[in-house]
Image (cartoon, rainbow, N blue to C red):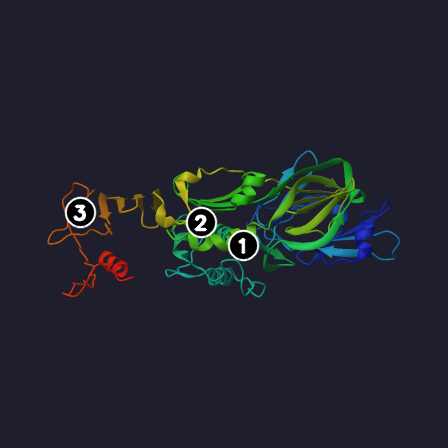
Amino acid sequence: MKNVTNSFKDDIRTYGRQFDYKVKINNNSVDIDEFNYIKPASHTSLFKTVMHTLEIDSKKDISKKSKINISVGVKVNEPVYEYINYNTYTVTEPSNRQEDTSSYIVKAYDKMVESMIDYDLELTEKIKLRTYLIAICQRLGWSTKNIPDTFINSNKLIDPNLHRGIGYTFRDALDEIATLSCSFLLFINDEFCMVYFTETNENIDESYLDEDSVTIGEKYFINSLVFSRAEESDNIYRKDDVSIATNGLHEYRIADNQLLSTNDRDIYIDEMFEYLKTLELYIFDVKTKGILFLEVCDKFNFILGGKIYPTILLNDEITFEDGLTEDIYTDKPSETETDYKYADETDKRINQTYIIVDKQNQKITQYANQITEHEEKITKVEQDLDSIKQSVSNTIDYKRKQCGIGQVKLTDCQDTDLMRLNICGVREYNNYLFPRRRTISTETYFQMRRWYR
């Protein structure tokens, strides 16, 4: 949440409020009459990067690479305005001239736009997720002081080489880090930050809202987490069966994340699921008279008709044009439903069919893997520019106990040419008791007792 006083929160919703705007371009103040409208916005979905955007309808052209700063002030009865500031925006493309209005539509972005370049790190060995995030920030020239010492999966090893040679930008890599850590990566006051949902304890009631444009949807929560590599039979999961039985399935699926393309995905899933089980929010789409102090990832409450709706802000669109309007909304994530009979809790016990595309070396590798109780079959096809190679590996593991004297017969075996057979014996020692001449049976003992009574 932006750092504002209680007076700001009261003034922003009070009839008769007054606004003032300050705009600087390359550190030079510009008269606000030069602009027809100013539209700052931010959009994201669960556990991604956030790039703040700015659109201006300007009477004068604003050149590419210009830096834009805006501040907005509000007051009612106070002698001075209380201002809030936004991130610095950079114009990244030429403006679009509007002939009908003789003005220019200018689009600019915050520092996250600097990550929209080709990924070029050369890290070949596995490193911790936090170390990887720091390496990317250092490559982009960003401060790392706001990266927590620990976070979800921060100490887990990942393979950064998975992001090389596949047409990724650094922002693509950051998106996958955010997903794996259940966090959001964004700039706040021009500083790079990793943030989790932040409790503000703010209550937004009807006094902030346009009562004709208020939609509160269903409560969203998660009781199943699925990692998918695009094939129905290649999923691993964690789920809360008690919650599913009571509330129905609410599944969150993560698909096609390169960092989860390996066969050890289960090492990441537990920390994530324990966190996601705590997530609850109401879906909403609301037009307001202006709030301004809420930021992406803020947790707050709608108080409507005597009911409380806890929720989280993900999307924010503000328009300064002859006044102020602000549209805030959080969309419902796409729902999926996995057929759990074709999935498992670990990669080691599921049948897999997947393709790994190595664009850097122009090679495609296809795997088909089937695991049963005693047998593992792997078919591997490698294709490059010059050839196609296929190999089939069939490993049969008979770790079953067979007894025999002089001869051991293995049953239920596959009819195949035997390449290797390993037999490990288990030696058992038994103490055999042999009767002596004076040894008698239990039955004889009790008969003798009856005779001598």
Q: Secondary structure at mark 1?
A: helix
Say what amino acid the circle numbered 1 marks. Answer: Glu
Say what amino acid the circle numbered 2 marks. Answer: Tyr
In the picture of the structure, the residue carrying the numbered disc 3 is: 410
Query: Label 2 to label 3, Cα distance in Å?
Result: 52 Å
| Residue 297 seen | yes
Q: Is residue 371 left or right of residue 274?
A: left
- Quarter of the N terminus within the rendering: bottom right
In the picture of the structure, the residue carrying the numbered disc 2 is: 168
- What's the residue at 58%, 59% (across, down)? 192
- What's the residue at 41%, 42% (across, down)? 343
Depicted 143 relative to depicted 92: above or below: below
Q: Secondary structure at mark 2?
A: loop
| Residue 170 seen | no
Say what amino acid the circle numbered 3 marks. Answer: Leu
Q: Quadrant of residue 427?
A: bottom left
